[in-house]
């Protein structure tokens, strides 16, 4: 009888262990000394903050032809690190123009003064309140980074982000800001039919309808908007020259790459900073063989 009871007890304990493994668990704090950047990862019902072991050595001085955008982001980040009021930031515009690189460069520039970064995927934004709770009492300053952010209709992360930015009783703590990049300024798809919801007053003013207002409302909760634009040919060549120089080429060698650099951009249909970087890597890799 005792053996049957012990076997049954063992099975019950095994069952309880399995049940506990699929139940949501409180988010634990990582080893904050292990890195200056972390990723929030969700496995089943469990989320955890994982240190980023290899961080790109991007420097602010390496980012060319985006001086106005760089000045705005750097000023806001400086205010934040110094404990002064600062804004959540939405960086929008053409792909490959340095939006994400600028945020990573700011992290490298200010990490020695206590700046840290937590990257959160769009699908995990519903867990933002838990992440904020974990870092709220830390002495560091945390940027919650959402890269390439956009939403489709009805996605749960939309309302979670909207609440944490502004309007929720449980607001973000003073040591947390959200920096997001997107190709959409309003973060939600816009449709031709929505233009029909606009209303006109007698004096000619135009007012958006409720659907449009809702789509605009999330973007407006970011205090600072920074726009990025496609590069001209000269700007593209300047960026490519910067990357070629960082790989050790001298001015004469860089000048000789100009025709190949332009063909590279033409083949890809883009003159972005990302394309310039890819050309530099390809060129330097080939001539080093």
Image (spheres, helix red, strand yellow):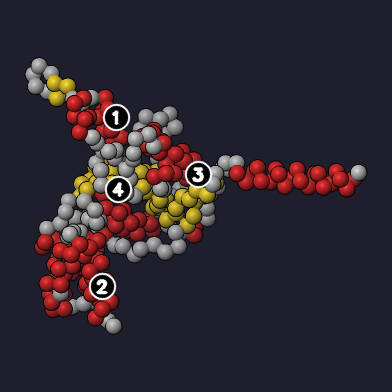
Residue 168, by quadrant, is: top left
Of the two numbered discs 1 and 4 in the rendering, the one whose residue sits closer to the viewer: 1
Residue 164 visible in the displayed image: no
Residue 120 in the image: state x and y as whole percent. Answer: 41, 48
Cα distance in 3D space between marks 4 and 2: 27 Å
Q: In front: mark 3 or mark 4?
A: 4
- Residue 134: numbered disc: 3
According to the picture, the residue beneath numbered tag 4 turns out to be 181
Are there few (<14), some (14-19), or many (20+) residues within 10 Å of tag 1? few
The Cα–Cα distance between marks 2 and 1, rounded to whole angstroms, is 45 Å
Which disc, if any, is residue 282? 2
Q: Residue at x 42, y 42 (%)?
A: 125
Alpha-carbon distance for marks 1 and 4? 20 Å
Q: Residue at x 52, y 55 (%)?
A: 31
Q: Marks 3 and 4, how far apart in space?
A: 24 Å
Mark 1 vs 4, N-terminal side: 4
Which numbered disc flags the more N-terminal residue, 1 or 3? 3
Q: Are marks 1 and 4 in contact (CB under 8 Å)?
A: no
Q: Earlier in the sequence, mark 2 or mark 3?
A: 3
- Helix, strand or loop at mark 2: helix
Image coords of residue 23 (percent x, y)? 60, 41
Tag nearer the camera, 4 or 2: 2
Indicate the quadrant containing the C terminus: top left, top right, bottom left or bottom right.
Answer: bottom left
* Image position of 86 (left or right of 69): right
Q: Earlier in the sequence, mark 2 or mark 1?
A: 1
Which disc is residue 214 wearing?
A: 1
Looking at the image, is 54 positioned above or below residue 7?
below
Residue lying farthest front?
A: 193
Residue 110 at x, y = what percent?
35, 56
Q: Secondary structure at mark 4?
A: strand
């Amino acid at each position: 009888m005792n053996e049957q009871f012990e076997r049954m007890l063992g099975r019950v304990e095994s069952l309880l262990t399995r049940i506990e493994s699929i139940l949501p668990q409180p988010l634990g704090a990582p080893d904050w000394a292990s890195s200056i950047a972390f990723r929030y990862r969700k496995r089943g019902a469990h989320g955890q903050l994982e240190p980023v072991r290899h961080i790109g050595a991007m420097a602010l001085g390496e980012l060319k032809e985006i001086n106005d955008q760089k000045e705005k982001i750097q000023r806001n980040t400086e205010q934040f690190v110094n404990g002064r009021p600062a804004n959540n930031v939405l960086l929008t515009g053409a792909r490959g123009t340095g939006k994400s690189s600028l945020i990573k460069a700011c992290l490298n520039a200010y990490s020695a003064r206590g700046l840290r970064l937590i990257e959160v995927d769009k699908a995990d934004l519903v867990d933002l309140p838990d992440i904020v709770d974990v870092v709220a009492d830390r002495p560091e300053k945390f940027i919650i980074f959402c890269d390439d952010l956009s939403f489709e209709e009805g996605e749960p992360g939309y309302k979670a982000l909207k609440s944490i930015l502004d309007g929720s009783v449980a607001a973000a703590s003073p040591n947390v800001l959200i920096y997001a990049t997107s190709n959409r300024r309003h973060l939600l798809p816009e449709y031709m039919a929505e233009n029909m919801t606009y209303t006109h007053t007698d004096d000619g003013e135009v007012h958006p309808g409720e659907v449009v207002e809702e789509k605009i409302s999330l973007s407006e909760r970011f205090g600072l908007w920074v726009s990025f634009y496609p590069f001209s040919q000269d700007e593209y060549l300047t960026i490519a020259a910067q990357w070629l120089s960082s790989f050790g080429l001298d001015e004469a060698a860089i000048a000789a790459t100009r025709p190949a650099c332009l063909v590279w951009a033409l083949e890809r249909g883009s003159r972005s900073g990302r394309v310039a970087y890819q050309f530099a890597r390809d060129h330097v890799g080939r001539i080093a063989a």
